[in-house]
Amino acid sequence: MVADASRALPATISHDAFFESARSLAGITLSQQDAHNFSWRLAGNIDMLISGNPVLPWTKQSENEWVPVQVTHVYAATRGRRSGYNFKCRVLAGSSCAIEFDQFISKGSCAAIAYSVGFSHAMPFTNALYFANLRMLVEIDVEKSEETPQFQHVTCTASMRKWNKAILAIRTRTALCPQDFTHQCEQCVFGYADCPASVFPIGLEQRMCASCSKEQFFSPARSVELCLSCLATEAIKQAASNA
């Protein structure tokens, strides 16, 4: 496998480093997801391979590290008495490359970081769901990352901000909706595969909700039992019970 894959990589990459990077796959039946994560981990750490250092799967954070992430999903959540949102983030490069982790961000913190990632007076921050699919540079905190990567500080590069603003322009209707819709993006059934401005990774499904007995929208990425409305109600109840 290493010999075959090496032909697709820069000639300057150390064969030994690549071989040691692939050793973690030994003994397993390689699934498509395993291969995807492995190739992504290598692509996000090409410099390490060139310098002769193997790229190993993340097990713990050894030091504070700035890494690029893409927010793949945002949904309402609570932590203790605080209400906010869970950001599901995919690490794009660095020691934890390809890992997807959940990061709780309070409502106040969402507003605090919004304008550093691309929101502006022309494209104001009004909805935390609009962080979905945006890219950020975050500092993985070694003290907070015992089981999964966690961060506290957020910034944004110029290229990331350009990516984010193109998405936010559609969501805030500074640019036209690709489908010529007039409703807000958080009310749209499309997923990422159908529209670059979607706030949902998978398109919504409409059917009867057993909880509220109404024809409602469901997010398959969140729950097949509760509709979006009931999920929001559950989050509010959870926050109230923790107060």
Image (cartoon, grey):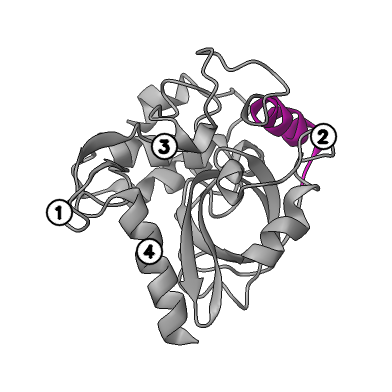
Q: What residue type is disc 4 on?
A: Thr
Circle 3 residue = 201
Question: Considering only vertical position in the picture, is 178 above or below 240?
Answer: above
Mark 1 and mark 3 lie on one chain; the one further toward the N terminus is 3
Mark 4 and mark 3 lie on one chain; the one further toward the N terminus is 3
Q: What residue type is disc 3 on?
A: Pro
Q: Which residues are magenta?
A: 156-169
| Mark closer to the observer (2, 1) | 1
User: Which structural element holds mark 3?
Assistant: loop
| Mark closer to the observer (2, 4) | 4
Query: Residue 173: x and y, percent?
Result: 67, 24
User: Which structural element holds mark 2?
Assistant: helix
Disc 4 and disc 3: Cα gap in Å? Answer: 21 Å
Circle 1 residue = 210
Q: What residue type is disc 2 on?
A: Ala
Mark 3 neighbour class, 10 Å CA radius: few under 14, some 14 to 19, many 20 or more: some
On residue 234, which mark appears? none
Disc 2 and disc 1: Cα gap in Å? Answer: 46 Å
Q: Are marks 2 and 3 in contact (CB under 8 Å)?
A: no
On residue 158, which mark appears? 2
On residue 233, which mark appears? 4
Q: What residue type is disc 1 on?
A: Ala
Q: Name the residue furthest bottom.
A: 243
Mark 2 and mark 4 lie on one chain; the one further toward the N terminus is 2
**Residue in the image at 31% along x and 42% along y:** 34
Query: Residue 206: x and y, percent?
Result: 25, 35
| Mark closer to the observer (1, 3) | 1
Front residue of 2/158: it is 158
Mark 2 and mark 3 lie on one chain; the one further toward the N terminus is 2
